[in-house]
Structures are given as structure tokens and as C-alpha cells.
């Protein structure tokens, strides 16, 4: 009969605890390393210009130090892992002292040296047997077990038979049989613990586990791709269409399901603050389509970011805005994916440009030169006048540093910041070509799999270098440089749109699609930055497709043709089952054929093909006989009824 075994339970418990504490300690140590020993570059707290110093200082405060670990989830996991680790150590010590995994070593049990004489062994046995005798240790199972081990150890060292068994099998009792037990503790069978065990079982199986499964399912079922809530996707589908303008996108983003809790106005002071900010940004806002407090507050806070008035917000509103900006990248990507699903190219491009404005703290009518540190509309206006003039950021970057305008009132440090920023800003070259893989000529025929190869070359970095973080001092979080590559028709339909995140100097991106019907086509290729304004590229991709009927006829290789005549696995099985029955029929059929066609030796392929055809006929005939017999039986039943 199987018995509950404490030692086996120790091993089972150790295994299950190890499954949890090993990855848990890895996660805890990783977070501790980031909080205490991570470099500024790893957390994105770099200040390449003085304009980024405040952002870098804020990132160090929020991303480094023990205070960054002050979250309920981390604290609970840390405490729970420590408790399990203590239990693990206790179980391990119990296994080492009482577990059957220990090899039987009589010298260790008696505490004597392997070279000890018989007199010394007897002395140690007498001493330990008195120490662990059951009469001196009543109601002590551990002492009783140790007393038996001492006796067995003494026997294995003094009795010739027991000593021989120990040397051969490692046990003085001789070869041991395999023992199987249940890996649960023995106290579960104790009558006194019956109610406690039942109550614990009910709590775990009826309450704890169902609640954990329900919690996990309800939380995970809310989120879709890119960890964006399904409610947000539904909101985007409802509000985005081919006529969506850039000025309406802040309201669309503000209505995301992720913001509905943090943007709920909880007091009259919050409402008054929103009204005050609304009065400041109303001139830059599109007329709101929704008056819901959550959407209105999010819309106002985003416009405070876009118009560079976030410093006037209260501390609570600034935290809410930071939360929105933290989620903005994934949410804007989700908006673009919705536009892709709708095949609306213009809306997708507007969403990408909206992401640029959010990163740089600018809006649609602002000058591109506001991306430069310390620049305002005044400096941007000076740059647009006289010669050399620069109305765009790329025109300004092309001017020599000594001839750059707008720096008259700047200090030496501020001028150096502008020059440094011009080195950081991207200088991109875009090249594209259309081809068909493994094609014999350069023509494209309808139905061909076409490839548009887009090569992006960063001219502002050296070979082997990688693009760094985006220079966005008004965006409170580090952001990696990436580029959106979109291919669309002249009618505004999306063929392909992808985000290229590689930081290499030269990046090649391939777009594949089937060639349309015969004719001449012109597509628009758009390459847009995910965070910089004014660096977008647009090219025309021309494609001429020819009629596929002009292609040479495809000839099947003889080996491939023979494969069509090869029987399938099912046909081989059917052929094997009826082979014995069809031997006589095959002989008679072959005789008839030889009489009709004359004497001619068949090839191996023809013979195999004929055998396969006969097997199929035989199988179909068998199926027909069954159906006929069924029909006959039905007729007989009808006549019998009559």
C-alpha cells in the first residue's frame, strides 16, 4: 500500500519552489541592478546639449535608486520570494539530515574515523546509543530514528554478514527493493488535522485558484496587439477614417481606454484648472467633437504639450500628462495599424506626423526650427529673412555654422548646443528600386511577386556607428530613432506600411506585393521619421506590367510528371489490401490487352500505372457492391412489409 512520505514531499516541494524562485530572483536582481548600478546611457539619461539636462536629471530620479522599486507588485514579489527561499533552505537542510538521498555511512553516523579500531567504535556506539535511547527521548521520532541508525551503523562495522552487505550494496541489510511512496507530508493523514486540511483545500481549490484564473483572464482579455486595450482599438476604428486631419488626432488619442481612469476629474479644483488651460490653448485646438470630461481633459493636456505650456500645469496634471506621453508611442502605432486596416494612406501619414509633434512639443503651424535648442518663434523669424535664409530645418542645417542666423543673443554654450543638435539631427538619403526575384529578364508581368527595395543611408554617422536617442528635450522619456516606410497608390490606398527600427548606418527594407494587371502604374513612397519634423521623404515609384500571355509556355520536367502518377499513401494501403484478390483478374486482363494490342513489353512505369488503375477500379467496384446490397435489402424489407 502506498504511504505518504515526508522525505518524498521534501523533494517535490523543492522542485516546485525552485521553478518559482529561480526566475523570480533573476528578475529581482535584474531590477536591482538597473536601479542601483545602471549607467546613464542604459536608462536614456544623456544630456548632449544643455536643453536635455533637465530631462536627464528627471530620468535619473525616476529610473535610478531604491525608490524606483517602491511598487506594490515588486514589494509583494520580493517578500513572497524571500519566504519561499527560507522554506527552500529549511527543506534542503531537512533532506540533507533526514532524506533517503543520503548514502549510508556508518563512520559518519557514529562520528568515528574510517581507520578507527573496534574498541573506539564500541565506545562511540555506547555513547550515542545512550544519547538517543527512546527511554531518554520519549515522544521524539527523530531521536528514535537516529537510535536505529546508530544500531545499524554499529552492526555494519562489527557483524561480518552486515559488513559484507554494506560493502556490496551500501546497506547492512543487503540489497534493497524499490520503494514507492506518495510525495505528500504524513500530517495530512493525521485525524487531528482533518478539518484544517479540508479547509485549506477548499480555500485553495475553490477560492484562490479560480480567483487567480479569473483575474488573469479578465486583465489579459482587455489587451490586444502592442499591449493596447481592445476598447482603444474600437475607439480608433470609430474615429479614424480617410478624412481624418492631424488637428483632430489629440482628441482621438485622449479618448484611449488607457487614460479613462487617470484623466477622470475628481474635484472642482481639477475642473477649474482644465477650464483655465483650455482658455490658453483654445486658439490652437480643433473644435472638440466630444464633451466627456475624460476626453476633454486629455485633449487639453495634450495641447499643453503641443503648445509648450506644460510647465504651467499643476503637479497632478503634469503626472497625468507624463502618463499619457509614456503610452503615446504604442497608442499612435495602434492608430497607424487601424489606418492600415482601413487602407487609408493619408490618415496613416497624419498619425505619423502627429507622433512627431508630440515628441518635439510642437504643433502644425509652428516652425520646424523650434526643434533646435533655445529657439523660439523670434529666432525662427530671423532665420527666414535675408540671405542666407532658412525656413526649414534641413535648409538651416545646410548653412555653415558661421553663417547661421538666429544666434545673435545666444551665449557661447547655447550656440554650441545648436551646432551639436544639427549634428545629431538625421541626414538621410533614400534610394528605391523595383525588381522581381529570380526573373530571367527585367520585365514585370502581371501576377509576378514584385519587390520594392528601399535603402536608407544615415549620412550623419560614420561606418559602424549606430543612431543614438532622439533629441527631444520636451518629451520626458527616451525615444529611439525609427522610420516609417509606406507605399501607397495615387488614390490614397495603402499597399504597405512598416516601422524600420534598425539603428545601423545603412538599412535596407523590402516591400513585396503582386504586380497588378497590364498597364503603367505610379506609386508614392513615403519615408517619415517617428520623432523629427521636416525630415520626411516622398518619391514616385513607377511600374510597368506586361501581359502574362507573352511568357513562354512552362514545360514540366519528366521527373516531375512521373511524380503525378505516384500513388498516395492511402492508395498504396488500398492496393495492398486487395492485391491478393485481384491477382487472377490482373492475369486475365493482361491477356486481353495483349491480344488487342499485340505482343509488347510494358515499361515499369506503365505497369505500375496499370496496377494502380486496376486497384482503383476494384475499390470503386467494392464500394458499388456494398451500396447495391444495401439497396436490395431495402427492397426486400419493403416487400416483406407489404
Image: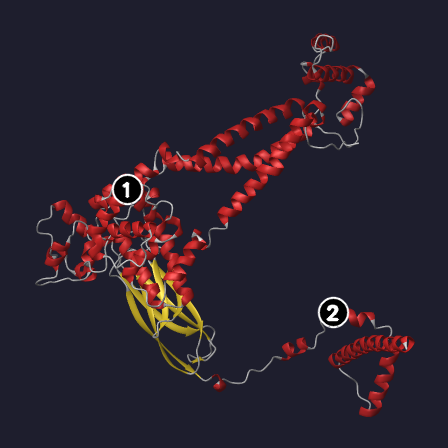
For label 2, the SS is: helix
- Along the line of sight, which residue is nearer the eye, 407 or 296? 296
User: Which residue is identified by label 1?
Assistant: 268
Instruction: Please identify, in this view, whether the residue under mark 2 or under mark 1 is nearer the observer.
Output: 1
Q: Secondary structure at mark 1?
A: helix
Quadrant holding the C terminus: bottom right
Colour mode of the rendering? secondary structure
* Residue 170 falls in image quadrant: top right
Residue 137: where, in percent of width, then height? 70, 10
Left or right of residue 374, residue 314 in this image: right
Q: Residue 583 at x, y = what percent?
A: 86, 77
Q: Kindly tell me whether residue 115 is visible in this rendering.
A: no
Quickly name the residue at label 2. Answer: 570
Q: Is residue 344 visible?
A: yes
Nearest the viewer among 137 and 318 is: 318
Label 2 or label 1, whichever comes before in sequence order: 1
Q: Quadrant of residue 431?
A: bottom left
Residue 350 in picture, x, y percent from top left: 31, 63
Amino acid at each position: 500500500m502506498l504511504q505518504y512520505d515526508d522525505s518524498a514531499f521534501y523533494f517535490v516541494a523543492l522542485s516546485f519552489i525552485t521553478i518559482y524562485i529561480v526566475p523570480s530572483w533573476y528578475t529581482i536582481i535584474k531590477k536591482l541592478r538597473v536601479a542601483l548600478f545602471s549607467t546613464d546611457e542604459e536608462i536614456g539619461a544623456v544630456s548632449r546639449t544643455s536643453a536635455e539636462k533637465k530631462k536627464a536629471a528627471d530620468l535619473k530620479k525616476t529610473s535610478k535608486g531604491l525608490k524606483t522599486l517602491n511598487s506594490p507588485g515588486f514589494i509583494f514579489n520580493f517578500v513572497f520570494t524571500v519566504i519561499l527561499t527560507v522554506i527552500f533552505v529549511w527543506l534542503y537542510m531537512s533532506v540533507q539530515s533526514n532524506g533517503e538521498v543520503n548514502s549510508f555511512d556508518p563512520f559518519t553516523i557514529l562520528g568515528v574515523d574510517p581507520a578507527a579500531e573496534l574498541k573506539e567504535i564500541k565506545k562511540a556506539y555506547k555513547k550515542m546509543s545512550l544519547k538517543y535511547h527512546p527511554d531518554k527521548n520519549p515522544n521524539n521520532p527523530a531521536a528514535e530514528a537516529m537510535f536505529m541508525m546508530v544500531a545499524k551503523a554499529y552492526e555494519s562495522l562489527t557483524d561480518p554478514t552486515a559488513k559484507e552487505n554494506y560493502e556490496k550494496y551500501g546497506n547492512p541489510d543487503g540489497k534493497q527493493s524499490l520503494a514507492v511512496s506518495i510525495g505528500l507530508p504524513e500530517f495530512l493523514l493525521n485525524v487531528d488535522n482533518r478539518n484544517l486540511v479540508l479547509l485549506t483545500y477548499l480555500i485553495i481549490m475553490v477560492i484562490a485558484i479560480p480567483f487567480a484564473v479569473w483575474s488573469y483572464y479578465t486583465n489579459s482579455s482587455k489587451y490586444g496587439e502592442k499591449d493596447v486595450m481592445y476598447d482603444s482599438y474600437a475607439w480608433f476604428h470609430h474615429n479614424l477614417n480617410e478624412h481624418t486631419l492631424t488637428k483632430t488626432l489629440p482628441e482621438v488619442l485622449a479618448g484611449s481606454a488607457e487614460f479613462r481612469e487617470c484623466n477622470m476629474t475628481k474635484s472642482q479644483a481639477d475642473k477649474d484648472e482644465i477650464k483655465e488651460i483650455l482658455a490658453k490653448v483654445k486658439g490652437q485646438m480643433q473644435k472638440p467633437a466630444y464633451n466627456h470630461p475624460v476626453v476633454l481633459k486629455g485633449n487639453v493636456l495634450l495641447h499643453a504639450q503641443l503648445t509648450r505650456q506644460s510647465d504651467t500645469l499643476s503637479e497632478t496634471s503634469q503626472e497625468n500628462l507624463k502618463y499619457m506621453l509614456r503610452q503615446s508611442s504604442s497608442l499612435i502605432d495602434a492608430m497607424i495599424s487601424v489606418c492600415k486596416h482601413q487602407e487609408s494612406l493619408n490618415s496613416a501619414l497624419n498619425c505619423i506626423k502627429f507622433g512627431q509633434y508630440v515628441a518635439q512639443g510642437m504643433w502644425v503651424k509652428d516652425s520646424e526650427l523650434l526643434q533646435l535648442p533655445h529657439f523660439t518663434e523670434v529666432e525662427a523669424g530671423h532665420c527666414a529673412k535675408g540671405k542666407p535664409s532658412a525656413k526649414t530645418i534641413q535648409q538651416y542645417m545646410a548653412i555653415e555654422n558661421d553663417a547661421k542666423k538666429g544666434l545673435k543673443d545666444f551665449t557661447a554654450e547655447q550656440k554650441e548646443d545648436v551646432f551639436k543638435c544639427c549634428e545629431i539631427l538625421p541626414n538621410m538619403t533614400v534610394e528605391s528600386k523595383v525588381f522581381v526575384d529570380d526573373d530571367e529578364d527585367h520585365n514585370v508581368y502581371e501576377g509576378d511577386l514584385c519587390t520594392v527595395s528601399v535603402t536608407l543611408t544615415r549620412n550623419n554617422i560614420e561606418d559602424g556607428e549606430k543612431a543614438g536617442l532622439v533629441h527631444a528635450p520636451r518629451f520626458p522619456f527616451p525615444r529611439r530613432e525609427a522610420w516609417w516606410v509606406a507605399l501607397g497608390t495615387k488614390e490614397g490606398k495603402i499597399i504597405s506600411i512598416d516601422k524600420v527600427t534598425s539603428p545601423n548606418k545603412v538599412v535596407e527594407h523590402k516591400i513585396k506585393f503582386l504586380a497588378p494587371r497590364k498597364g503603367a502604374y505610379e506609386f508614392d513612397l513615403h519615408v517619415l521619421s517617428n520623432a523629427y519634423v521636416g525630415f520626411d521623404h516622398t518619391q514616385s515609384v513607377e511600374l510597368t506590367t506586361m501581359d502574362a500571355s507573352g511568357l513562354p509556355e512552362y514545360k514540366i520536367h519528366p521527373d516531375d510528371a512521373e511524380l503525378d502518377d505516384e500513388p498516395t499513401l492511402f492508395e498504396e494501403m488500398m492496393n495492398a489490401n486487395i492485391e491478393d484478390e485481384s491477382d487472377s483478374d490482373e492475369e486475365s486482363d493482361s491477356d486481353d490487352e495483349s491480344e488487342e494490342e499485340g505482343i509488347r513489353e510494358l515499361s515499369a512505369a506503365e505497369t505500375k500505372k496499370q496496377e494502380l488503375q486496376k486497384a482503383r477500379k476494384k475499390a470503386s467496384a467494392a464500394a458499388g457492391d456494398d451500396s447495391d446490397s444495401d439497396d436490395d435489402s431495402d427492397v426486400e424489407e419493403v416487400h416483406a412489409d407489404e
